[in-house]
Amino acid sequence: MRNIFFMIPVILLGYSTAFAGDTIRMGTEGAYPPYNYIDDDGNLAGFEIILGNELCARANLTCEWVKNDWDSIIPNLVSGNYDTIIAGMSITAERDKVIDFTQNYMLPRPSAYVAASEDVDLSGVISAQTATLQAGYIAESGSTLIEFATPDETISAVSDGEADAVFADYDYLAPIVEASNGDLMFVGDQVVLGLGTGMGIRESDTELKAKFNQAITSMKEDGSLNKLLIEWFGEGILTY
Amino acid sequence: MIFDCSSPDQLDRLMWSLCYLSNGKHITFYYSILKVLVLLALAAPISIGLGLFLAMLAKSDISPIKLLGKFIILIVRGIPDIAWFMFFVIALDQGLEWVRHITLCPDWTEPIRQGADFLVCEKAKLPSNSSSETIHEIYGFILAIITFSIIFGAFAGNIFSGALEAVPKDQIETAEAYGLNPRQIFWRISFKQMWIYALPGLSNLWMILIKATPLLFLLGIEDIVYWARELGGAKTPRFTEYPHGDWRLWYFLFLLIFYLTLTKLSEKVLDKLTRKLTYGMGFSGENFLQRQ
Amino acid sequence: METVIELVNVKKNFPGVSVLQGVSLKAFKGQVTALIGPSGSGKSTLLRCINLLENSDEGEIIFKGNPILWKGIGVSRSPKDKKQVLEVRTKLSMVFQQFNLWSHLSILQNVVEAPVTVLRWNKKDVEESALDLLGKVGILEKKDAYPNQLSGGQQQRAAIARALCMKPEALLLDEPTSALDPELEKEVISVIKDLAREGTTMLIVTHDMQLARDIADQVIFLHMGKIEESGNPDRIFSRPTSERLKRFLAS
């Protein structure tokens, strides 16, 4: 009797599949070139998309890409909306408390300051994306931190004059500085933060983590990861 | 496409604009406008239906039913919309998965919550992992519609409650005196006269609903706010054929115009509707005696 | 003479005030019974107790020889038999001081509403009869208008037509002209007089003494919830015996 009662909403609202699929849902942000972004046709593109697809192929998994805002990217992983986070996310001790990481697929990259003029005071107002390593770093330093939900907005803050400088991943900033025709420039020193970029996985999903670790290792061993890194980040990138 | 967009950097301004505004990303933006309209088209009638239902509950002679109706209306109105949105979407989503989990996977012995993780067996996942992202998006959208409808339904319930109260007691009493039974009095007198009192509140609620549609964005649905922000952000030549600076102002201006147009149109339609429904009842200050 | 309505020692209390303190009367078929008295004497309440819009606390209400059956006693008493209530309400049609036409319905719709919905008579027949009545009270041309578009006098005449369309045993009129300006009163009074002349059974509460004098077969003077004096209009108006009645008529 109880079962029938429960089945009604179940039948009305959902459908079940006959098999426990091997489809893995890959969560990414879609707003962080060159790691991941949306191309002119509206599709996800970027280094991590290519990497992700390759890793899935090597791990014999069917993968489906999911876009999620940066703010809720960890909570939604933990809730089960998708199975991995592959979004330029640095491995940090703090994040490791909530989720697990695979080994890194990028060695720690420098973060840099970008400002609208050479002589800017880096102890002033610095913009960074919310809940990032960089935001944490600025918060600890003496400067005033202002946070934004998307990487885009951190740049606009500098152009608008809201912030003296932005502190973000060097790889994200480089194309922007280039395209700015001198309006934006690198200032100050570069800082290396974090333990490299890795894939976020639920703590309970040990099997999946193992599969991806295996795939990443194989890409490191046969040099394909290095090739991909150089392709997307230029010759200066540290390789495995 | 009908125009040749293969080398955007060589096009003149007009052609560049046309190609830009019709690229795949922008088409998705236009579809999201459709999403907003669909949300409005579905949430409004569902809210009205739910509101009527709640108002009838709150009017019931049976004490526990009456209390239930009033309670639902009170808490949904009293707690901030955003809190409800977050709660409902997560609660509904996890709730449904949990129900499916205990019915479909009775032999799953591990706890559902492990540390911070919420886990259900593969078969219970709703929608399942193997269905496309499109299905997932549709499901998320449906949850959003349900959430909007519940919230606005409670507000509508409050409006209908008040409107039912506002029907002059004389009208009801006269119907009693002429032998109409309570059911007949409700449907033939109260229900019909109530609309006139409900309309101002409902019109207002519709406007609020329009303005609340960007909450879809908070629910992680790619609505027009999401796309305006995404498309407006500065784009470097390396990653696009249509580089541009920070155009968010323009995109948000477009949103503004879109919403204003929707509001203006709504005003016109609601005005007409009000005049039609209150014809002869002397509500809009018409002076009929003059016309005779 | 057939007694249509009989009240025996009817009492009604509202919190703090005793509105009816034991009223007994008889209203006869084909006759007009006028209830007069100062404001607050309980006249309207009495009328509303008769068609069970109010529940009296004590006493008998007898309609066409059948007493109303009650459950409970005193303040908590209410009619036991729903069918009886329906019978009383459909056979005694009320005309209200404020007309109370249903504002969302046209005049014609107002008139046919109860006969069709409650009595379940054939709609076409009722409409024919309604048009007749509207013509009789002189507002046929307003049949498709809405109450709000009519003057007070026109509305009240429509209300009378609505009451008559039920083909009631008697009309209960609760101060039918009190809400009308003198110019508009005349048209309604004229209709009421016609009805009286035709032998319509009526129980009318009024403070239009002239009207009572002109049409009543029986005048009942109510004071503070009790019947002070009653009798035929000639005697009541020219030779009142009770002090209070004398003072009332003089005012």
Image: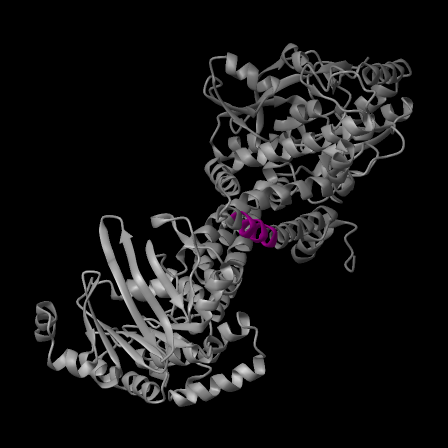
Q: Is residue B52 magenta?
A: yes
The secondary structure that dominates the magenta segment is helix
Q: How is the structure coloured here?
A: one colour
Residue B292 as seen in the image, left or right of residue C20: right
Q: Is residue C21 visible?
A: yes
Observer-nearest of C193 and B143: C193
**C64, above or below B50, in the image:** below
Q: Quadrant of the C terminus of chain A?
A: top right
User: Residue A138 appears at what percent x and percent y?
Assistant: 53, 16
**How many marks can you see?**
0
Q: Is residue C164 magenta?
A: no
> Which picture quadrant has residue A79?
top right
Residue A174 as seen in the image, left or right of residue C155: right
Observer-nearest of B201 and A175: B201
Q: Quadrant of the N terminus of chain A?
A: top right
At x 54% / y 57%, what residue is drawn? B262
Residues in magenta? B44-54
Q: Is residue A81 visible?
A: no
Observer-nearest of A13 and B70: B70
At x 86% / y 34%, what residue is drawn? A17
**B200, above or below B275, in the image:** above
User: Residue A172 appears at what percent x and percent y?
Assistant: 66, 27
